[in-house]
Image (cartoon, coloured by chain):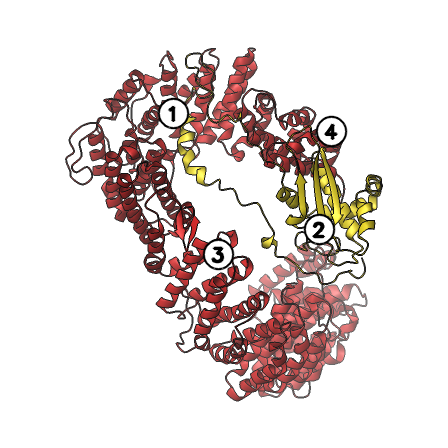
Chain colours: A yellow, B red
Amino acid sequence: MSEPINANPTVLDVNALPTRGEDHKQEKALDSQVQELLSLAIDHGVDSDVQSQAPSLLSDSEEQEDPIDPQEIFDLIAHISDPEHPLTLGQLAVVNLSDIKVIDSGNRDEMGEVIIKITPTITHCSLATLIGLGIRVRLDRCLPVRFRITILLKEGSHQSENQVNKQLNDKERVAAACENDQLLNVISKMLATCK
Amino acid sequence: MDLSLNISQFLANSGSDENRASAIVERFANQIHSRDIKLIDLIKALGDYLTAEDDLLRPKATQCLSGTLNSLKKDILTPNDISVLTGFYVSKLEDGQCTKETLYGMSSLVDMDSFGPSNLDKVLKGLMEQYDSTKNLASTRYYGLLTLQRIFTKFVNYLIQMKKDKLFIECFLHVASGEKDPRNLLLSFALNKDISSSLNLESFEDELFDILFCYFPISFKPPKEDPYKITQDQLKGSLRSAIASSSAFDKDSYPNLLEKLSSTSPSVKRDTAETINACIANYGQKSLIEHWLEIWNAYKFEVVHGEPDDEEIGVYQSLLNTFTEISKVLTSNEVEFDQFASTLLKDLKESFQNTKTLKQTCLIFGAIAKANNIAYNKAVKLVLAQLLVKTDGLNVREERELIQNLGVFTSAYKDVYGTTSSPKLQDYNNGLKDFKDQILILLGKSLMGSSQVEVSLRTLAITELTNLTTLSDFLSNSELSLIAQYFTETVLMDDNEYVFNSAIGGLAQIAQLDSSVLVEVTLPTLISLLPDADEPVRINGQDKPKEKIFDVIVSISTGGALVNFMVIRLLNKLEQLQTTLADPVPYSFLILSSLQKIITTSESSTQFSTDTLFPSLVKLIHLLLKFPSLNQDDAILESATEILKLIVVFSSKSFHQQLSDDTLSFFTGLPVANDDYYKDLEPINVFAEPTPLINILSKVLAGVNKSVSINNVDSLINKLVEFIKTSSFQDGYVRISYLRFLSLIINKWNCEVSKYENITFDSVLSLEIYTWITKGVLLRIDPKSETFIDVLVGALSDTSLGAMAANSFEVLVVDLSIFEKFKKILNNNVRLLYKQKFFDLVVPKLVEGFNGNDDMKIKSNYLSALSHILKHTKREIINPHLPSFFPLLLQSLNLMDSEVRLASLNTILSSVGEVSDLITSHISSLIPKLLALAQSDRDHLNTEPVRLAAVNCLHSFAMALPLQKVVPYQKEVIRELTPVLDDKKRSVRKGAIDARQAYYELGRTVE
């Protein structure tokens, strides 16, 4: 790559990116002292006819569901590298948590939709399509098939907004791009920093 | 022996068998030592060969003589001998065919004791006139340089006194010029250094410098199999110290070096800067006064526009070091140093307006400050006055930079005055103190006055405040308290992980300096915030969960004094809660579990004696016995008794016997002789009916030193076994508590166990008792343990009890707190290697049992026994046995037990890297199994951990197994993992995403 198109972008601190709060799992560590001890009863979990107790509390027949939310999408794409800076899309604020929308009923038989609006660092960024393609490939690989993925440029953030939007959401063109080995290599490189 | 025969032998072997040849020479030398022959005889015998026409023979003959000389003792030759031999060798220099042998002989000759100054001229002149280094090989030139070096070492004073410097230097220049062999260069540089630093250089400094500087910068790469093992750094260092050896070089060296400074190669740049630093340090003040301006002018651009954070092999740091070196040399001359500092300040003045180069400017002055006390005060005065002019109305970025720039001077402070833990220099009026108030105000404002969103600014302010606390002789006690207060408020108010952690780190640092500050400032604040009821804490008008306060307390309570303080205060709180709250259980548990954490973490970082905690031990026992709310809740009791154990473990051994006797009497319903622990309490008999209070007894006995004795252990064990057998336990916790106590006694005290060997398993309880007895025996690797284990392995094939026997194996290897080992403390008989021993013993038996049975149900007993063991065994112990039971592992993935599945998956996961061959050979059956385990199933057997472990296994295959073995499964894995992307649990989805990504990228190389 010759001269970077935007040589001096604003960079966010990695720590400042939105994250899901740490789960406080440690709290339970001591509470489980007794649980662990109880599990040492040798008739624990054995189907014995003598004492037909209710299934132990530990069995998770009622597994709680974690819905797919904007933060999850953000975590998937924020660590994609920018094609011209050694920084991630999250750091460059190309993707923002507030610009991600998830429509999902939670029903596995219904379609869901993810809408992401990206903000190129400058309005004439010719790499917007590449960034968009990178995000699309990442999400295609990561999201269940029932989700429709729409990637748009944030209103007013780019000179040729409509053109790029059209390109990014055209299945045929995306598929064609993914057949191009060289392009796929570039994208592999962008995705290599994903956590 | 025949001399001529030996000579012929030498001549025959020389050039072909050097070992033989040198042995012969060695023999000549010995014969001369023992006066069997004379040197003159040897020379006579060699005579014809030495002058032979044959160009191959002459060098060999010379070699024979030179070799003998080299082996001779240094005192054996007379001055006359030497004089003759010198004449011989000098004349021999004319013979171009044997220069090497001649120089070799000459180098040995000059080293002889009787080699006097009278021979010196002859040798030096001979070398200059007859020897041409450029015509000879490296090994020959080596002896030329060696001769000169030996002469120099021996005659340096003579050369100076007799004003022969000129001759010697000329000779050196002649011999050393054009050298390019690394070994010779090392010699040449060293000799040059010696010459330049001791002889009168007269008009030769240019030439001596040229013969050095033509090699700069050294970019030598050692060839493979270099016999001399000379490294680039050796050459660089040697050349550097030669260049820096004499200030006579300065008019040449500075301009030349400074010119190289603009090199684009970072390593050349660093080498140059380091050489300049060496020159500054060695040339002395007088030379530096003439040159510092020139150096500064050349450096200006490099340092001001250099990138300090671009840590490429430390280039920038070596540039900065130059300023430290200059300051070190100049500070003894006040006028000159002032001149230097103010010139720099004048040139850099603009950067105080232009923030782009301010950082570099501060680094330069920081480097100056590092030099010493005088430089520090000067630099701080000049720069901080300018830096701190404007501290109001800064934006966040400017504020951050300002703090970073201040940090340069605090870190220089550490270099000059040291830290509180290792002070270097005392100076009560150092420059930084003048700015102390301003700095504290600034940092205080950045931390306390800026929005909580400014994570990096606040973290930086905390780091810098913490830094200040470490400075030797800097902060007063009240200032330290103020900082502690800032940090305390921060940890309470701020939930951001980074800010929280660095503030906690700051508090811990203060605790290390002076724990009384925390006892006075932080802890009372924390305690006073604890609510009286089971409700959130109100801090500055905001509700926070009270767990947060406990988090803080746990994180900062380190060391005996703080722990003692917290234990006393929190137990008081605990007591108070029991009467004021309707349901004190949740709050009580929070307090007790926090106390447990405090003691555990604090003791594991640095052990301290808990003797001072004994009153608290007594108090806690009394509280437990008094309040049903405390002794009826399993979790509270477990935590509380764990605290008792910890206090006992870390206390002095001298308390233990009485504590153990009293406790045992008290809990078996007998009157207690002493008033120390159980005053005014009614004894309890744990054998009257099952009671959870057995745990107090159990944990106290678990804590005491193992040298403590117990009367009549065997009858106690009997009583216990009978009691457990005949009692009906309503509560699982109580039953396990009694069993655990049994196991403890059997492990800790010598007792008779063989009568339990052949217990008949008439009930689940009898099997359970047997299991716990076995645990006690096994942990001390009793010779009987194999018998016990065999019985348990046998029980696995029992149709009714087999499944429970499988669970017994978990009991055997699980790590229990009563058997925990502590550094330097002997409180149980747990042998370190018991698991390894057990594993080695039991795995073959389980594999055999598995293979020998056809009933699927029984087979599965063996499998689950194995997976229970695996769950609690370290990988290093498992791996050697893995091939023998890997097939079992695969089968256990089909068992209808999620715990078993998880244990097997984790074993596979942790061994992928080490036994990849084994896994590769089973890959065709593994991958479909793992794919199935990754999906949710109807029976809920694939729990979240199972599904996650399964996808992680698949992921690890892509990373660790040979590519060609995994590629065939690429498409299948990607396809089959697609439904997992819609898993209910986020962790599993993420695992599947990462696994799929790894398979997508399989074989794709990203450059």
Determine contact: label 3, label 1, CB under 8 Å: no
Residue B217: horizontal and vertical position, in percent? Answer: 71, 70
Which circle's residue, 1 or 4, is located before the other in the chain? 1
Q: Quadrant of residue B968?
A: top right
Q: Are marks 1 and 4 on the same chain?
A: yes
Q: Which residue is mark 2?
A: A81
Q: Quadrant of residue B907?
A: top right
Q: Secondary structure at mark 4?
A: helix
**Which is nearer the eye, B536 or B517?**
B536
Disc nearest the viewer among 2 and 1: 2
Give the number of the disc on residue B783: 1
Distance (Cα) linking label 2 and label 4 = 28 Å
Give yes or no for contact between labels 3 and 4 (Cβ–Cβ under 8 Å): no
Disc 2 to disc 1, how far (Cα)?
A: 62 Å
Give the percent coordinates (x, y) of residue B347.
63, 82
Residue under pointer 4:
B972
Disc 2 secondary structure class: loop
Q: Amino acid at mark 2?
A: Ser
Q: Nearer the viewer, residue B75 or B477?
A: B477
Q: Are marks 3 and 1 on the same chain?
A: yes
Q: Above or below — where is B381 with respect to A16?
A: below
Q: Chain of mark 3?
A: B
Tell which tag, 3 or 4, sits nearer the viewer.
3
